[in-house]
Image: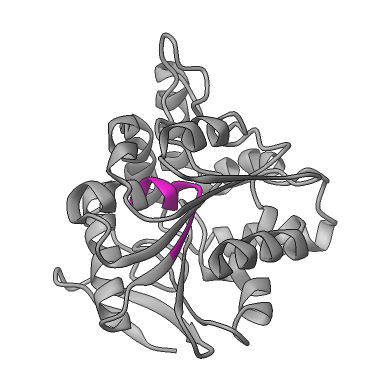
Amino acid sequence: MPDLTMRDGTRLHVRDEGAGPTLLLLPGWGVSTWWFRKQFETLTASFRVVSYDPRGQGESDKTTRGQRTARLAADLAEVVAWTGDEPVHLVAWSGGGSTALQYVELFGTDRLRTLTLVGASPKLLKSEGWDLGFADLEGLLGWVGLVGSDFGAAAESLLPAFFAAPLSPEDREATLAEMRHCDQAAMALASWDFIIQDYRDVLELIKVPTLVITGADDVAVPAGNAPYLHEHIAGSRLEIIEKAAHCPFLEQPEQFDAALRKFLDA
């Protein structure tokens, strides 16, 4: 699997398998390409499936440098350029959705063929009139403090919100072990920058076919974000996957893949 070096010298670990139109899977905060393992099994027969570990996460460089959405969007732009001249199908999950929206604001949609937002929110900070966020300001301060002092404890506290049904002890430990590959200080910085952003005014800039997917039971990024995104992204489609929370591609992979294929084939 190739590694890419960004313009600022940071190395990103990339997974690139299959052949066909490029389907770029973008992980969110605190995770890696490992979370898309089922899609690498099922979608590579029809697509060139590309994913990468964001800086500070997975097998990419452990660094606090560039832990802000603008730099993460620039990393995405460099990966998109690396894939070749053809536009890509971008599937962005969770915090990856924030990166994708920042990308749209900075770089537009010319290099995107389609956009799929999974478990994403345009505004992760709760405020007056906006209850669909991850945390309010007091909660954000507490969360960033926990991440920066004990990332393992933060991951353990967050994990139950990712899945509609409890993981087996074996799957739970494997998942937490994967998350612990992240750089603690980097994740604290990234948490702050992700959550304070407000991309509601970016939604009107999305000029490509867009699919919005949520698990019906998502509370990590409340499922109510999906209807909001659908309403404010012109011509978008909405898919709500039952018996799934924040990780519908893992919890209900057949339904997720079918919804994604139907959208991409249209």
The magenta stretch spans residue 216: no
Q: Furthest residue to the left?
A: 7
Residue 189 occupies which quadrant of the picture?
A: top left
Name the foreground residue: 205 vs 149: 205
* Residue drawn 27% across the image and 67% down it: 111
Query: Could you say which quadrant of the image residue 158 lies in?
Result: top right
Picture quarter with the C terminus = bottom right
- Please report the residue visible at 73 percent of the width from the left and 36 percent of the height from the top: 217
Q: Is residue 45 visible?
A: yes
| Along the line of sight, the residue nearer the viewer: 128 or 147 | 128
Residue 174: give x, y in percent of width and height.
70, 65
Residue found at x 22% / y 50%: 70
Q: Where in the figure is residue 113, as x and y percent of width and height?
A: 38, 66
**Rendered residue at 41%/9% (across/down):** 128
How far from the left and from the top, in percent, is residue 232? 42, 33
Color scheme of the displayed model: one colour
Is 37 on the left or on the right of 47, as rendered?
Answer: right
User: Looking at the image, which is closer to me, 177 or 76?
Assistant: 76
Q: Total number of numbered labels?
A: 0
Counting from the top left corner in percent of width and height, residue 105 is at: 22, 46
77 with respect to 2 (left or right) = left
Evaluate whether residue 68 shows in this view: no
Q: Which residues are magenta?
A: 90-99
Instruction: Relative to 126, say whether 176 is above or below.
Output: below
The foreground one among 167 and 48 is 48
Locate the N terminus and report the quarter of the image it occupies. bottom left
